[in-house]
Amino acid sequence: MHVLILGAAGMVGRKFAESLAAAPLGDGALRLSLVDVVEPVAPAGFDGVAETLAVDLSAPGEAERVLAGRPDLVVHLAAVVSGEAEADLEKGYRVNLDGTRALFDAIRLRHDRDGWTPRVIFASSNAVVGGDFPDVIPEDYILTPQTSYGTQKVMGELLLADYSRKGFFGGIGLRLPTICVRPGKPNRAASGFFSGIIREPLVGQEAVLPVPDDTRHWMTSPRSAVGFLRHAATLELSRLGTRPNLSMPALSVTVAEQIAALEVVAGNRATALIRREPDPAIARIVAGWARAFDASRALSLGFTAETSFEQIIRAHIEDELGGRVG
């Protein structure tokens, strides 16, 4: 099986590649094509074929180049994240919209030439909704994003649905919740503090909280995100009907509930390291995001996630800290 991962240098892309290397999907030998704007690293110990490329997908001809090997599965994770897409409008649309359309059109043209029809997994976001929404977003809610990033993801979803309807590829879009706890250094996502207030205190470092404690959000772990991708790679696409974009299951928790779970797991020495420093710009962005989703479609199709925030924290400790709190 040949898998192309776009955005493979990012956290989710890297973990998905590692998951495939440890437990391949499908029949036959696994071949990985790992692509990002900076050259990704192949999974440690992987003895199969792995090519790594530094590519700007929105540049002319680059989408065609990365598709030259006719992968069976294309996983599109590459994106300019929410805070950066809001701050740099041109870059956000160039990468998140133009790059996505370039990829889809390159597949379409190849399909028209020789009938190649890969499966495409598109990473969307819960930012596709916004504004004056209910406490729980229903499955049939009209998409009303209030950020440039969310708008760009809606456009990607619509392209995925139309190109799938036309038969150019078999598409499935995953509206990923905020991923928490993200390992490594913070990125420019406006949601990054949700991870920071857990990740840094667990290793004895101070973390900044820019929003009120009663801020509620929809999140899941990196483990679950990888599980979503693995399940989407093998799901019978006919079960999606005419609606290929799905809201993934997750937890609706407040910042206060996050902090309470951290105290249960790591004690008050950890929670004492959280410094409250209001940031109106971040608070305004986060206030435009949904607090919970009805993910019954995804659940009925076999997607799963954690059922408590303590589970999310313990998964981070096991996966990133060797099972120990420092």
Image: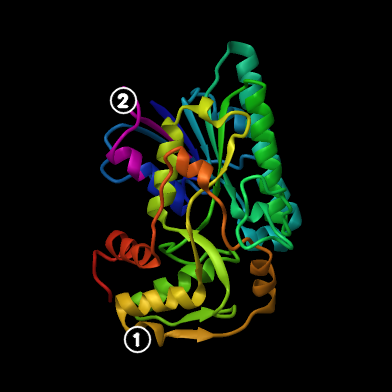
What's the residue at 45%, 54% (across, down)?
11
Where on the picture, by quarter, is residue 320? bottom left
Q: Is residue 246 among what the camera can see?
A: yes
The reply to whether the magenta stretch includes residue 32 is: yes
Q: Is residue 42 among what the camera can see?
A: no
Q: Position of residue 102 (x, y in %)?
A: 67, 34
What's the residue at 51%, 46% (across, down)?
296
| Residue 87 in the image: above or below residue 168 | below
| Residue 74 in the image: above or below residue 14 | above
- Other-residue count near label 1 (Cα within 10 Å), few / some / many at <14 / 14–19 / ≥20: some
Q: Earlier in the sequence, mark 1 or mark 2?
A: 2
Q: In the rendered image, which residue does mark 2 sit on?
A: 29
Q: Residue flagged by tag 2: what amino acid is it?
A: Ala
- Other-residue count near label 2 (Cα within 10 Å), few / some / many at <14 / 14–19 / ≥20: few
Q: Are marks 1 and 2 in contact (CB under 8 Å)?
A: no
Question: What distance separates the C-alpha of mark 1 from that of mark 2?
Answer: 49 Å
Q: In the rendered image, which residue does mark 1 sit on?
A: 268
Q: Nearer the viewer, residue 63 or 210?
A: 210
- 309 vs 48, left or right, is right
What's the residue at 66%, 69% (across, down)?
287
Where on the picture, by quarter, is residue 157? top right
* Part of the protein shown in magenta: 18-34
Q: Secondary structure at mark 2?
A: loop
